[in-house]
Structures are given as C-alpha cells and as structure tokens.
C-alpha cells in the first residue's frame, strides 16, 4: 500500500502481544504529566494560583459548557461507579449525599469539626480551608441504573444504552460502563484528588468505584487550540455559544425529569505514540487533513480557515478519508450532527512491554447519541488513523439536569 506497510504489520504484532488498555499493565502507576500548567513563580513563593468558582445551582450542570480545558480547568478525573444501594429510597439518599458533597466542594469553605474523639471530617489535603479552585462536578447515570433494581426502567432517557462497540475498538470490561459517572475538573490536581476522596468517603456503602482515570489539558502551543498527543490541534471546530446550547441539551421525546440534561460520551483512547512518531509528516497531515504546525486545513493558511470541500471533490488536497473531512463534512445535512467536545489527555506510564501508555479521554456532550455521536463515529470507521489509536474503555451516560437550588438534589425529578 504505502512505504509504511511493514510498519503497520509490526504495529499489529505489537497489539497481539500487549494489552491495549490499562488493566494490570501500568508499571509506573497513574503518574500524570501536568507540569505545563503549574505556576512556577507561585509555587516558589508559596502562593496559590488563580482560584475561581462556577455556579453549582441552575437548570444545567456546570462542567458541560464551562470553558475548558484550553482556557480553564486544566486537570480532570473521570470516574464510573456501580450503585450498591439496596432500594430506590437508598439510591435517593445516595444522590442527596452526593449533592451535598458536590455543593460544598465546588463552593469551598471550612469542613465541619467533629471533635477530637472522631475521625476528621476532611483529609486536609487542601489545608483547613477548602478552596473552590475552579472545581466542577458533573454527575451522570448509565443505562444499567435503569434495570429492575430500582423500578426506574420506564423512566430511562430515550437514547440511553450501553456504549456501542465500533469496528477497530478493543473494549476491556474493567474499563467499561457504570451505573453512575462523575466528571471532576479543576485548576489543580490536588483539588481533584481531594474531591474524589471526599466523595468516596461519604458515599461508601452506597456506590463502589468501577474505573477511574485522571487526565490533563494542554495549553495552546503556541496559540489557538491545544494539541493532542499526536501533535495536532484538537477541537478546532468545536461549536460554541448559542450553537453549542442548541446541540447539547436533550430535546423532545425525553422523560419530563430529564429536561436540562445531556448525553455524555466517554471514550478512553490509547494513542500508539511511539509508532506515530515514525510516520512521515506528509502522511500524518494527510490522515488529519490539517497542517501539524499551524492547524490550518490543507487547503488553507490559518487554523480557523474553513476547508472548501466543494472545490476539492476528489480529495486531491484534503483526502476523502481525512479525519476532519469524515468527522465534519460541513454540509447543511450534517450540521445538526456536530458535537460539543471536552476532551483531556492521560498518561499511565508504561505497559508490560515498556511502551508508553498514554492517550486521550474523548469526552463529548450531545443532544442525541444516535443522530450526533454515533452517526459521526460511523463515518470514521476504517479511517487511516485507526492504526494509531485504540479505544478501550468508557461508556454512555446521561448527564443529569442541574440542581435548582439549596433544597434540590441530583436526580430529584427521577427519584422523588
């Protein structure tokens, strides 16, 4: 096929001989490369960096259209849980507890003093006065929560189902699905650690950790949109403003309780970076359809130039199977298929063969799983990039409507 045909063959041998994902293969633990976002001067002086808070109450949850990770919240953690609640009433209590912890953690403050005879109410990882630190906590529910355990089957969101496995995916059961999902995003990694530890402590006995991955967002280099671990700008055409709102909040046909929610797709994708680094720049750019240095489409000069596919019907400039051309054909018929991306990168160290185990936590929010994400992903089946990326985990979740006020709680409309 091409000059890289022998290389692709060895890549397949590599996949046969090594676990693609992360189960039992990370020999250096969960070390994350987040130093690019550290404020060196502040660290030296002992002062904290920017501290912000985002609204907790509202019609929609924060963390969906909240700016980031290019602008804010460079650190994240994505966690899935199995519910161990034994009844619908106990599940409601779990949601109330989860709401109370999220409300406190995202607002900040002084933890409760339980007295010297009791274990402390807080780990003190962030000190005696917990900062908000730009933390958002976004809670979702998986299709499995709507089984027979809690009598919720008839109330399941219309499109919610177990995540579809596409050709070229390599699913690992230990990294798939879950009754509940929690997305945490913040300005610093210790804020993430503190929050997930606090939540786990207060919900023990009602939900059990299923899988967890920590991730980081890269700053723009040198400007514009951040780059992924393949070196290309990632999310250049992400919808914003009113267009984003039109594409993200679930629409007609959903149960009444679900108004204000959104379908969340989490796909944990390993990137075979060491193999990618041996591919010519010409071939790399052809696979993406963009220039690596500037992010410009191959028929343009700047990152945000709009590719003109009509002037290139045979793909002589931007190949017909280029990622940007398949993902967003830019036609009137495909305009309502666009996705709201909120993705991060991860690094799990080394696998059992000593290869770098890093990649992308692909996160999107959309109004309709089938019309948007699944339609786009179907177009990407067989694209040239599949030799260098390997999805192995994640799930579909329904991000719950927002918590209206101090008396409200997650999923109150579902469980009341």
Image (spheres, helix red, strand yellow):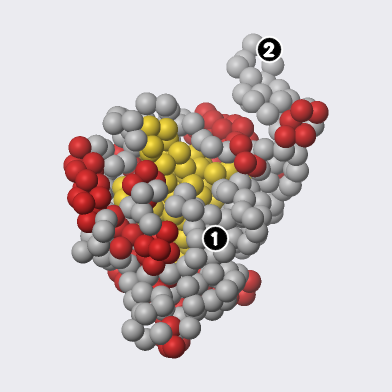
The residue closer to the viewer here, 234 or 384, is 384
Q: Is 180 left, or right, of 259 in this rendering?
A: left
How many marks are shown on the rendered structure? 2
Q: Position of residue 278 (x, y in %)?
A: 36, 49
Secondary structure of residue under mark 2: loop
Q: Quarter of the image for the N terminus: give it.
A: bottom left
Residue 59 can be seen, yes or no: yes
Q: Are marks 1 and 2 in contact (CB under 8 Å)?
A: no
| Mark nearer the viewer, 1 or 2 | 1
Q: Could you classify mark 2 by the number of other residues whose Cα lies within 10 Å: few (under 14), some (14-19), or many (20 or more)?
A: few
Residue at x 33%, y 30% (from the top left corner): 354
Instruction: Locate residue 369: give its quadrant.
Output: bottom left
Q: Position of residue 306 (x, y in %)?
A: 54, 78
The residue closer to the viewer here, 320 or 199, is 320
Secondary structure of residue under mark 1: loop
Q: Position of residue 314 (x, y in %)?
A: 33, 84
Residue 137 can be seen, yes or no: no
Q: Is 224 left, or right, of 344 in this rendering?
A: right
Residue at x 73%, y 25% (from the top left corner): 128
Look at mark 2 in the image and give the residue it sits on.
Answer: 116
Q: Could you classify mark 1 by the number of other residues whose Cα lies within 10 Å: few (under 14), some (14-19), or many (20 or more)?
A: few
Which numbered disc, 1 or 2, marks the residue that appears first in the sequence?
2
Instruction: Locate residue 101: give its quadrant.
Output: top right
Which mark identifies residue 31? none
Which mark identifies residue 293? 1
Residue at x 66%, y 51% (from the top left corner): 72
Residue at x 75%, y 43% (from the top left corner): 50
- Residue that lies at the very extreme toward the front in this rendered image: 3
Report how far apart the C-alphas of labels 1 and 2 lie in the structure: 58 Å
The residue closer to the viewer here, 384 or 138, is 384
Q: Position of residue 137 (x, y in %)?
A: 57, 47
The residue closer to the viewer here, 65 or 3, is 3
């Amino acid at each position: 096929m091409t000059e890289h045909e022998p290389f692709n063959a060895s890549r397949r041998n590599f996949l046969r001989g090594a676990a693609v994902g992360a189960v039992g293969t990370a020999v250096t633990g969960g070390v994350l490369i987040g130093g690019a976002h550290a404020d060196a001067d502040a660290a030296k002086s002992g002062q904290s960096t920017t501290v912000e808070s985002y609204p907790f109450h509202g019609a929609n949850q924060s963390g969906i259209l909240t700016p980031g990770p290019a602008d804010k919240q460079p650190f994240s953690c994505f966690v899935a849980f199995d519910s161990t609640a034994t009844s619908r009433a106990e599940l409601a209590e779990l949601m109330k507890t989860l709401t109370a912890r999220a409300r406190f953690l995202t607002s900040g403050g002084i933890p409760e003093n339980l007295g010297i005879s009791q274990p402390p109410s807080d780990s003190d990882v962030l000190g005696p006065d917990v900062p908000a630190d730009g933390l958002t906590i976004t809670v979702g529910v998986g299709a499995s929560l709507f089984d027979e355990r809690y009598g919720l089957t008839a109330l399941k969101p219309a499109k919610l189902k177990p995540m579809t496995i596409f050709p070229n995916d390599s699913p690992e059961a230990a990294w798939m699905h879950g009754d509940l999902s929690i997305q945490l995003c913040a300005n610093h990694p210790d804020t993430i650690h503190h929050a997930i530890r606090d939540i786990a402590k207060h919900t023990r006995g009602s939900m059990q950790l299923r899988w967890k991955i920590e991730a980081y967002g890269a700053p723009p280099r040198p400007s514009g949109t951040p780059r992924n671990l393949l070196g290309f700008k990632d999310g250049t055409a992400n919808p914003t403003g009113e267009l984003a709102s039109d594409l993200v909040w679930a629409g007609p046909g959903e149960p009444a309780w679900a108004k204000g929610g959104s379908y969340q797709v989490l796909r944990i994708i390993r990137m075979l970076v060491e193999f990618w680094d041996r591919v010519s720049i010409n071939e790399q750019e052809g696979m993406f359809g963009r220039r690596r240095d500037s992010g410009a489409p191959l028929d343009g000069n700047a990152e945000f130039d709009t590719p003109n596919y009509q002037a290139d019907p045979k793909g002589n400039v931007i190949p017909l199977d280029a990622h940007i051309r398949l993902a967003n054909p830019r036609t009137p018929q495909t305009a309502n298929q666009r996705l709201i991306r909120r993705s991060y990168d991860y690094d799990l160290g080394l696998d059992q063969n000593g290869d770098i185990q890093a990649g992308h936590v692909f996160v999107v929010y959309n109004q309709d799983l089938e019309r948007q994400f699944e339609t786009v992903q179907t177009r990407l089946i067989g694209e040239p990039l599949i030799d260098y990326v390997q999805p192995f985990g994640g799930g579909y979740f329904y991000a719950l409507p927002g918590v209206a006020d101090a008396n409200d709680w997650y999923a109150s409309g579902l469980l009341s």
